[in-house]
Amino acid sequence: MGRVAARTVAAELKPKPAPVPTSEVRTTPPAVKPELATSCLGCHDIPKLIAKERPGYWHFERAHRIVVARGLNCTGCHAEMAPFRASSHRIDRELQTGTCQHCHMSPPFGGRRIAAAE
């Protein structure tokens, strides 16, 4: 009787539609106001901080070298700190994990590339 009941219930169930993604995955930092980044550079000398390698700062140095080379805005990765408020001027690591995709996700697959030997 259990199998009969299961088949009856399964026949009456309506299939659920496939979930629709709510947003695209970003692979570039969001656009932000340029003046917010310039205020960061008044206190944080990023070029000096990344000039010499320090133990324990491998990721910080690599990520900020890219930021400096590309002229990216600080608030692209540190949006939780804008606008500046001295009382809450702390990096929120949990919120910041949402920005990892800017560097660590590849762009959408554009098709197979044919190698020169093929």
Image: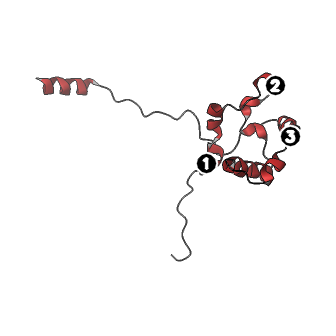
Question: Which residue is under mark 1?
Answer: 104
Q: Earlier in the sequence, mark 1 or mark 2?
A: 2
For badge 2, the amino acid type reads Ala
Marks 1, 2: nearer the viewer: 2
Residue at the (78%, 29%) spot, across then down: 82
**Residue 5 spot, x, y in % from top left:** 17, 23
CB-based contact (under 8 Å), mark 1 and mark 3:
no
**Residue 46 spot, x, y in % from top left:** 81, 46
Q: Is residue 2 above or below residue 107?
A: above
- Residue neighbourhood size for the residue with mark 1, other residues' Cα within 10 Å, grouped as few (<14), some (14–19), many (≥20): few
**Residue 21 spot, x, y in % from top left:** 52, 35
**Quick one: which residue is furthest to the front in this view?**
55
Near-viewer residue (76 or 115): 76
Res 114 → quadrant: bottom right
Question: Which residue is under mark 2?
Answer: 86
For badge 1, the amino acid type reads His
Near-viewer residue (118 or 104): 104
* Residue 22 falls left or right of residue 81: left
For badge 3, the amino acid type reads Leu
| Disc 3, SS | helix
Residue at the (87%, 35%) spot, across then down: 39
Near-viewer residue (28 or 6): 28
CA distance for labels 1 and 2 = 30 Å
Q: Is residue 75 above or below residue 56?
A: above
Res 91 → quadrant: top right
* Residue 30 falls left or right of residue 71: left
Marks 1, 3: nearer the viewer: 3
Can you see residue 78? yes
| Disc 1, SS | helix
Question: Which residue is under mark 3?
Answer: 41
CA distance for labels 3 and 2 = 15 Å
